[in-house]
Image: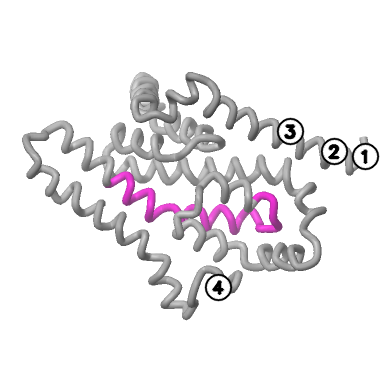
Amino acid sequence: MTQNTKKHLKFGIFLAFAAAVVWMLLFTPAGRHLLSPEGRQEAIQWIDRIVREAGPLGPPLFVLLYSLGVLALPATPFNAAGAFLFGKYLGAVYNIFGATLGASASFLFGRYLLRDFAGGLLTGKLGELDRKAEKHGFPIVFYLRIFWFPFIVLNYGAAATRIRFRDFFWATLLGTAPSIVIITLFFGGLKKLLASYRGPSDLLSFDILFPAALLGFSFLLPGVVRRIRGDQSPETASPE
């Protein structure tokens, strides 16, 4: 088998994987149910049950489920499950581990299947951008993480470029940690609220308002970072 054939075969395998995920999520009853609020709640309950049944092996099992799940699924249900299972603080730690390992697995999977094919397309100006991505991989991934760039898209998109794995790993760990902590704090506060809810005034509790305020600030953070760096807009920002 020639290198060119291998390149196209691996790309075809990735397309088949992506198509299978889209088909299962959007065109099957089970997939559509999973994307519904009720389905997400059932998924969280399922994770909760099997992790609790695992006893002392529950935390590493949860991290494994998280890291495998985000190969194709949104991370939010896993973040919620981490908060409900382990509380706000341990939940945040396990969620960060799961997200980082899942992103790393996605990157390595995508690098093996996509890089050879994408490398043949990234020529000229695109090739120059690809070389800059190799040189400035850490800040590129880090800023995209704190800018709330879609998690799965960035995992596989970065894999198709020359970005080095170590830059991707550390940028993902550091760049996703703030948002995961905020989301886990919010879900942890929500769990506490649901357990002791007495009336609308409970919505004004610190456990709800503080992570909600942090979440709002996190969406303003990219603009603050650009001002500090002297950038005028994402479009004019350098690839550093």
- Magenta range is 159-185
2 or 4: tag closer to the N-terminus: 2
Task: For residue 54, say whether it is visible.
Answer: no
Q: CA distance from mark 1 to mark 2?
A: 6 Å
Front-most of residues 83 and 194: 194
Callouts 1 and 4 close, C-beta under 8 Å: no
Q: Residues within 10 Å of mark 2 (few under 14, many from 20)?
A: some
Query: In the visual, does 236 lie left or right of 162?
Result: left
Q: Amino acid at mark 4?
A: Ala
Q: Position of residue 66 (x, y in %)?
A: 46, 35
Q: CA distance from mark 2 to mark 4?
A: 37 Å
> Is 175 within the magenta?
yes
What residue is disc 1 on? 2
Q: Secondary structure at mark 2?
A: helix
What residue is disc 3 on? 13
Q: In the current view of this chain or complex, which residue is farthest to the front?
A: 27
Q: Residue at x 70, y 36 (%)?
A: 14
Q: CA distance from mark 1 to mark 4?
A: 40 Å
Q: Secondary structure at mark 4?
A: loop
Q: Amino acid at mark 3?
A: Ile
3 or 1: tag closer to the N-terminus: 1
